[in-house]
Image (cartoon, rainbow, N blue to C red):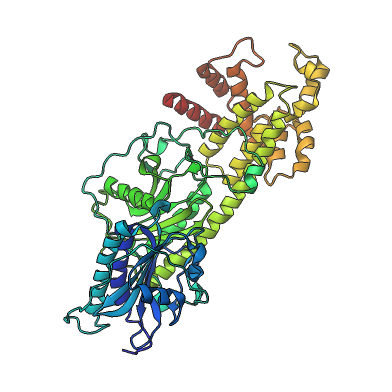
């Protein structure tokens, strides 16, 4: 073997990764890297690592004379660094983390210093402690020595080991300045996949059912939910946030321990299904899962598989996902699955190998891709490259979606402030608008509109009656209006369009508001549009405004019951309202009533 290289092929990398990944299970280190000394040389080269965020890797080598080597050579024992402010030599190892923490251990074989085990960032932000984390790390280093002996990298595989590895000790460590960047890492020492070491339970404990179910963007017939009643029908209204300040959107909001359960928009689900399908075709993967981080919502985990997964396998996906997620616990989660071949018996057993991949790190967490397989076979370097490439594509898509969502929240904030300004003039306008907006968004999701259309409907529903602010409030309080006054009232959609046009919404908000009083049969106003020439958002707002007005009693001597109103809406199906929208709305309201 050449004295200038540690490349022994995938066999050595896979064997080392099997031992290295125990750092995650036994010590709780979310990142780990193994460096081995090149025989005959003083430098250490990376052989295997896991957990580094997308686009970053640990340095390819630690050269002779580096401060980290000097410190380890002097101490001859492991040490902890939980505060790197005084350890600039660790900077090159701190990529992808704001507050990296380290447990650094020398590895000895037959008295010779042959390797360095660098562990970083305990699960859920904890600190390293030598007394607690030292013993399992010693055992891992011992098994790494056995792996090196198997491959005859140093000495004889049957020879005795004169000196055992030094016991671990608590101190600090920092990344060396001037080490090669992660991009310099050559393909042959690319990371190998992490293996699933925790034993899979034979029986999966039942998940605690959440007390309030989360809204779902109407899963398709191929999508199923795990951990919730009512199968794919288990979705309910999104908890409405009455106000979001613009200042809160400039800087990331603080972590919210009481995050609401949220949803994943249809386009993000569809995009992930495509990426996961490609991975399953290219690799021998049993399942592919995705967690999308959000500071204000606990979103579902998406899981794709070719065959139906048993409840035990689905539970394992949740368990291993939460292992990597700070401040997220299994009872808070649900799983939305998509199965390509739903026929036949569910796939049983357990996952033997999996690879977690960080897609995007946010201020409070990260997007996480998980690729599972049941075969006890590590992913090859070429397979890892495929996962990383498709992961980059998926990560970029999620970044764009997150930016788009922030813009939407900013427009929501502006919309709420406009409504707040109306409370002194028209006290009933804000509650009516918010009630309409809640149902409009749910109905848009049920109709499986695009994310852009859902966002447009949400904002348009909030502002659909803002044109009334340009009318005389005393006139609006009259019990009966003259023909001229009625004409003025009917101008409010056009007045709203004029008022809002300078806001330059990135969606068809103004158009939806302008036409929300059109009728399916063409006898509405202001332009007499008919059928599908009426924007879908206008058709949604029109039917919900009618429902909300009749059930609240506005314009009537007394409010009508929901069942009676639904019957009246059904009578107007095909004349005033779009029949498809009426049918979906009746189903939505009925389900909400059944769910209480």
Q: Residue furthest front?
A: 74
Q: Which residue is drawn at 35% across and 35% down?
A: 209
Nearest to the observer: residue 53 or residue 502: 53
Nearest to the observer: residue 304 or residue 250: 250
Q: Where is residue 239 in the image (x, y as percent from the top left)?
A: 52, 33
Q: Where is residue 433 in the image (x, y as percent from the top left)?
A: 65, 28
Q: Is residue 481 left or right of residue 265?
A: right
Q: Where is residue 402 in the image (x, y as percent from the top left)?
A: 57, 51
Q: Quadrant of the N terminus?
A: bottom left
Q: Is residue 290 left or right of residue 113?
A: right
461 shown above or below 248: above
Q: Quadrant of residue 478?
A: top right
Q: Which residue is drawn at 40% across and 53% down?
A: 126
Q: Residue furthest right?
A: 484
Q: Position of residue 318 (x, y in %)?
A: 35, 48
Nearest to the observer: residue 31 or residue 527: 31
140 shown above or below 370: below
Q: Is residue 535 visible to the viewer in this orientation of the structure?
A: no
Q: In which quarter of the image is the C terminus?
A: top left
Q: Quadrant of residue 138?
A: bottom left
């Amino acid at each position: 073997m050449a004295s200038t290289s540690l490349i022994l092929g995938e066999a050595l990398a896979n064997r080392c990764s099997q031992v290295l990944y125990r750092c995650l299970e036994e010590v709780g280190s979310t990142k780990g890297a193994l460096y081995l000394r090149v025989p005959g040389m003083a430098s250490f080269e990376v052989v295997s690592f896991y957990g580094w965020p997308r686009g970053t890797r640990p340095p390819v080598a630690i050269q002779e004379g580096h401060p980290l080597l000097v410190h380890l050579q002097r101490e001859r024992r492991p040490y902890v660094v939980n505060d790197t402010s005084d350890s600039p030599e660790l900077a090159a190892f701190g990529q992808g983390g704001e507050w990296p923490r380290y447990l650094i251990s020398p590895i000895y074989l037959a008295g010779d210093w042959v390797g360095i085990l660098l562990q970083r960032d305990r699960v859920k932000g904890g600190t390293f402690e030598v007394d607690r984390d030292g013993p399992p790390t010693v055992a891992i280093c011992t098994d790494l020595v056995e792996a090196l002996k198997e491959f005859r990298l140093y000495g004889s595989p049957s020879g005795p080991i004169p000196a055992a590895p030094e016991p671990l000790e608590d101190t600090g460590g920092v990344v060396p300045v001037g080490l090669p960047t992660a991009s310099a890492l050559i393909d042959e020492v690319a990371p190998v996949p992490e293996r699933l070491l925790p034993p899979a339970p034979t029986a999966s404990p039942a998940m605690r059912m959440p007390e309030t179910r989360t809204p779902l963007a109407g899963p398709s017939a191929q999508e199923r939910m795990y951990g919730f009643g009512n199968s794919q029908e288990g979705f309910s209204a999104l908890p409405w946030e009455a106000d979001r300040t613009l200042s809160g959107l400039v800087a990331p909001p603080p972590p919210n321990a009481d995050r609401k359960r949220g949803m994943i928009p249809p386009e993000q689900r569809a995009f992930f299904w495509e990426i996961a399908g490609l991975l399953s075709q290219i690799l021998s993967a049993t399942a592919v899962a995705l967690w999308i981080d959000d500071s204000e919502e606990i979103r579902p985990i998406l899981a794709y598989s070719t065959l139906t997964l048993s409840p035990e396998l689905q539970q394992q996906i949740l368990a291993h996902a939460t292992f990597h997620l700070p401040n997220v616990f299994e009872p808070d989660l649900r799983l939305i699955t998509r199965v390509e071949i739903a026929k036949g018996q569910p796939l049983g057993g357990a996952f033997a190998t999996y690879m977690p991949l960080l897609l995007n790190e946010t201020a409070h967490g990260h997007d996480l891709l998980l690729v599972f397989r049941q075969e006890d076979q590590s992913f090859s370097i070429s397979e890892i490259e495929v996962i990383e490439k498709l992961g980059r594509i998926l990560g970029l898509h999620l970044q764009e979606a997150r930016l788009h969502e922030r813009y939407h929240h900013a427009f929501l904030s502006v919309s709420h402030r406009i409504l707040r300004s109306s409370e002194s003039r028209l006290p009933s306008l804000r509650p009516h608008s918010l009630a309409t907006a809640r149902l409009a968004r749910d109905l848009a999701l049920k109709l499986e509109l695009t994310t852009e259309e859902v966002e447009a409907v949400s904002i348009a529903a909030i502002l659909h009656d803002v044109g009334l602010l340009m009318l005389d409030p005393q006139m609006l309080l009259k019990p009966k209006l003259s023909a001229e006054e009625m004409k003025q009232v009917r101008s409010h959609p056009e007045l709203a369009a004029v008022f809002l046009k300078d806001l330059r919404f990135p969606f068809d908000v103004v158009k939806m508001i302008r036409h929300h009083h059109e009728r399916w049969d063409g006898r509405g106003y202001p332009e007499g549009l008919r059928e599908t020439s009426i924007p879908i958002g206008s058709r949604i707002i029109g039917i919900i405004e009618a429902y909300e007005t009749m059930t609240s009693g506005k314009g009537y001597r007394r409010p009508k019951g929901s069942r009676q109103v639904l019957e009246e809406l059904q009578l107007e199906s095909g004349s005033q309202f779009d029949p498809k929208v009426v049918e979906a709305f009746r189903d939505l309201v009925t389900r909400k009533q059944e769910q209480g």
